[in-house]
Image: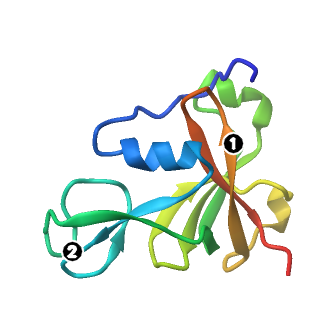
Amino acid sequence: MSEYKKPIPVITSETAQYWDSAQKHDLHIQKCCNCNRFYFYPRDNCPFCFSNKVEWTRVTGKGKIYSFTVSYRYTSEGFRNEIPYNIAIVELEEGIRMMTNIVGCENDDLRIGMPVEIIYEDITDTVTLPKFKPTIP
C-alpha cells in the first residue's frame, strides 16, 4: 500500500463494527430491533424510535445512485491529482443512503438511478473504504 494522503476516518466505539466489517470486505449496517428499520451513520440509538436495542446486520451492498456531484476543486492536498472526482449518495436496497465515490466509470457517465454495487479500497492496514461501481447488467 502506498502512503495515503487523503483524510482518514476516525474510528470510534460507535463506528468500530462498521469499519471492522469493511476491512473484511463485508458491509454491515445497524438495524433497530424495536422498529425493524436500517439506519446509517452508526450510532447507539435508533434515529426513528430512539431505542438502544440495535444490531449490526449484513446488507447486500447493492443500490442505486441517489445523487452526485463532480468536484473540480480539491479540499485537501490528497485530492489534487484526482480532480475532477465525484461525490455520490448511494441508496442501498435496504433503504439507507451512504456518501461515497463511484469508481470504474467516467464522471460524465454517472446518472441518477444508475445501479451500483459495493467494492472496497484498502487505504491502510486498518481502514478500508466502501466505494461503489456501476453494476453490469
Q: Residue 83 or 88: which is nearer the viewer?
A: 88
Residue that mark 2 sits on: 48
Coloration of the structure image: rainbow
In this image, 125 relative to 111: left or right? left
In the rendered structure, are the residues bearing label 2 and label 1 in contact, judged by CB atoms less than 8 Å apart?
no
Q: Secondary structure at mark 2?
A: loop
The amino acid on which the numbered mark 2 sits, given as a three-letter code, is Phe
Q: Residue at x 39, y 34 (%)?
A: 11
* Quarter holding residue 63: bottom right
Give residue 15's quadrant in the image. top left
Residue 52: image x %, image y %? 14, 62
Is 36 placed left or right of 110 in the picture? left
Sequence-first tag of 2 and 1: 2
As displayed, is residue 79 above or below residue 4? below
Relative height, residue 51 to residue 84 (above, below): below
What number is the disc on residue 62?
Answer: none
**Front-most of 104 and 31?**
31
**33 above or below 89?**
below
Residue name at image x 38 percent, y 62 percent: 40
How many marks overall? 2
The spot of residue 78 in percent (x, y) is 67, 25
Amino acid identity at mark 1: Glu
With 49 as the anchor, is 8 left or right in this view?
right
- Asked which quadrant contains residue 31, the reply is bottom left
- Residue annotated with mark 1: 121
| Foreground disc of the pair 2, 1 | 1
Between the C-alphas of marks 2 and 1, the distance is: 31 Å
Q: Residues within 10 Å of mark 1 (few under 14, many from 20)?
A: some
In the current view of this chain or complex, which residue is farthest to the top? 3
The residue that appears at 29% across and 45% down in the rendered structure is 14
Quadrant of image for the C terminus: bottom right
Q: Quadrant of the N terminus?
A: top right
